[in-house]
Image (cartoon, grey):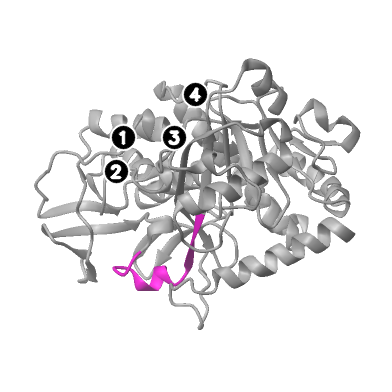
Amino acid sequence: MLAGMNASIFHREFKPRPYWWDHHEPTALPEIGLPKQVRVAIVGAGYAGLNAALELNREGLDCIVLDANEPGFGGSTRNGGMVSGGVNVGKRYMARALTDAEAAPYLTDAADAFTHVENLITRENINCGWTKAGYFVGAWCKSHYDGMASKVERLNRYAGSDAVLIPREQQMSEIGSDYYRGGMLIRRAGHLHPALFFKGLLDLCQARGIPIASKTPVTKLTEDGNGWKVETPRGTLHAGDVIIATNGYTGDATPELKRRVVPVGSYIIATEELSPDLAASISPKNRSIADTRRVLTYYRKSPDGKRLVFGGRAKFGHTDPVETAPILYQFMLDRFPQLKGVKITHAWTGNVAFTLDEIPHMGRFGNMHYALGCNGSGVAMMSYLGHQTARKIAGKVNRTCAFDQPEFPDHPMYNGSTWFLPWIGRYFRTRDWIDRRFG
């Protein structure tokens, strides 16, 4: 526990499970028989896998989705439900000082990912609390704010973000806190209920007769010249193509991909219901909010506007949410002292997947298709990359997606073990302290 904190707030009074699961909890589907042969086998029943399945089905290609757990068990029902129009993806490219010509395709396709999600929700009438309320990025220090001017210009030019700078003296109109040194408002952004968005995708797949095999881990993949031999504890099937859509849960069946993504735990808490005045004081315009701190925090109100859902990198590594809830609570109070004494009802964790170049990737490793590496932008990016991968297999792509790269970097010192994450966390915390004090 953090020193001086009221321990009663955390004495097992909250549920160590996602708040989102109160509305849709992943459950195993009725067992189905595995076909002997299928045109495409999709490994992973999350956003990427189900978006791929829906597009393949639309193009008349039969497929099956295989998942080691219940569909949606991973990050697809555990994330913060924030959907940006390219800013989360774009900040990595702009931080690497790419030229406009280098950055533009990534930002444009990241904006297309937002459009894909919005159009899918609208077209299929998915009831998931979709709210296009904008996204405020708080500057951790003055130098971060000063650097936002060029980011706003690029985001507007290439991603259509409708972004503006918000100086510190005006930020209280966006966030009920003077914690940041100003910030950047992205108007083309929104938030949703991530588990209900996933449920909408799952319902669409089931309505269209797409087979989904839960509790069916893929243990081995072997290329046989005419496709793939896909082995599971429940039997073996043959697939013409395979899509790996496991993201932060990529495992030993694909070691060449496991060493190209770094699973990082992201931790989230949800408060009890707040009074209307208190809820309004946090985010008067119902924005999604994040910051430029390396030890990132991100937060937004629940779809009904009654709770604060607050997430961040409370720990670098993988640990119990019971341990991280007090840390997140203190982060929350740092920004909103008015929430002191408010109780937590839920605390949970889930994996996001970072890549070594901090770019989401789709493509082929040999003849194996993959859509991996959300880098913290899972709702939009994984949905989009799954959709684009299916279109590629169906031969419907009329231009190359910027994230479809011939190279997917690895590192000779990394084999999938994340032993180094606590050391990165220490470095990030030190750099954040220096920036806050001197930046």
Mark 1 or 4, closer to the camera: 4
Image location (x, y in percent) of residue 141 = 84, 51
Residue 420 shown left or right of residue 366 in the figure: right
Mark closest to the chain's N terminus, 1 or 4 = 4
Residue at label 2? 71
Query: Where 225 sits versus 359, above or below?
Result: below
- Asked if the residue under mark 2 is in contact with the one under mark 1, i.e. CB atoms within 8 Å, the reply is yes
Residue 306 shown left or right of residue 239 in the figure: right
Secondary structure under the numbered disc 2 in the rendered image: loop
- Under mark 2, the amino acid is Pro
Residue at label 1? 202
- Under mark 1, the amino acid is Leu
Mark 3 or 1, closer to the camera: 3
Residue at label 3? 19
Q: CA distance from mark 3 to mark 1?
A: 19 Å
Q: CA distance from mark 3 to mark 4?
A: 14 Å
Range drawn in magenta: 251-265
- Under mark 3, the amino acid is Tyr
Mark closest to the chain's N terminus, 2 or 3 = 3
- Under mark 4, the amino acid is Gly
Mark closest to the chain's N terminus, 3 or 1 = 3
Q: CA distance from mark 2 to mark 3?
A: 17 Å
Residue 298 shown left or right of residue 179 in the figure: left
Mark 2 or 3, closer to the camera: 3
Seen at 78% across and 61% down, the residue is 433
